[in-house]
Structures are given as structure tokens and as C-alpha cells.
Image (cartoon, rainbow, N blue to C red):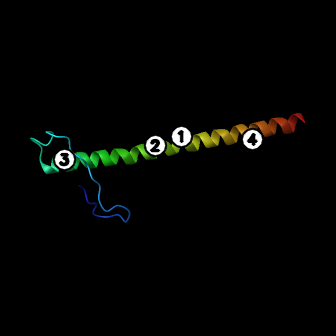
Amino acid sequence: MVRPERGDLFEQAIFIVRDGEREGRSPDDILREACVIAEECTHRRRSRVLPALMSAAAGAAAVGAAWLTTAIIF
């Protein structure tokens, strides 16, 4: 269980450790790995925003080009 020092939204995050995987690892090692996993989740979410914005811009450009083409022809 990880309790963030700051943040208004989450009180705690719970990570379930596999049976037998704790042997030979300190609590700091386990906490460090949990933080790495949480950080990876935030990076995945950010990486989805840019392709969505690029798709929206490409769609807007295609609509603009189609409108311009029809305005010139007709």
C-alpha cells in the first residue's frame, strides 16, 4: 500500500505482490518498483494525447482542403 505525500485525489494506491516474490527484496525495493509502475502509467496516458491531436488536425486539414476544392470548382 502506497500513501502519496501530496495530492488531493488519491488517498492510497494498493499493489498486490506475487506470492514468493518478496524474498530477498527490501521494502524500499518493492516501493521503488511500485513507483516505477505508477510512473509508466502516467507516461502511457500522455503519449495518447499527441496522436489524438494530430488526428484532429489532419481531419480539419482534409475538410478544409475539400471545402477549398469545391469552392474553386463550383
Between the C-alphas of marks 3 and 2, the distance is 26 Å
Please state the horizontal and vertical placement of residue 12, each as a whole percent of the image.
Answer: 29, 59
- Decide if residue 26 is on the left or right side of residue 33: left
Mark 3: secondary structure:
helix
Pointer 3 local density, CA inside 10 Å: few below 14, some 14–19, many at least 20:
some
Residue farthest to the front, as pictured: 19
Tell me whether circle 2 and circle 1 mark residues in contact (CB < 8 Å): yes
Q: Nearer the viewer, residue 40 or 73?
A: 40
Nearest to N terminus: mark 4 or mark 2: 2
Outermost right residue: 74
Dot 2 alpha-carbon crowd within 10 angstroms: few under 14, some 14 to 19, many 20 or more = few
For the N terminus, the image quarter is: bottom left
Residue identified by numbered label 3: 30
- Residue highlighted by disc 1: 51
Q: Residue at x 20, y 41 (%)?
A: 18
Secondary structure state at the residue bearing disc 2: helix
Instruction: Tell me the residue that label 2 is attached to.
Output: 47
Q: Which residue is mark 4?
A: 64
Closer to the chain start, of discs 3 and 2, is 3
In terms of secondary structure, where does tag 1 sit? helix
**Which of the two discs, 3 and 4, labels the residue nearer the N terminus?**
3
Please tell me whether mark 3 or mark 4 is closer to you in this view. 3
Residue type at mark 4 is Gly
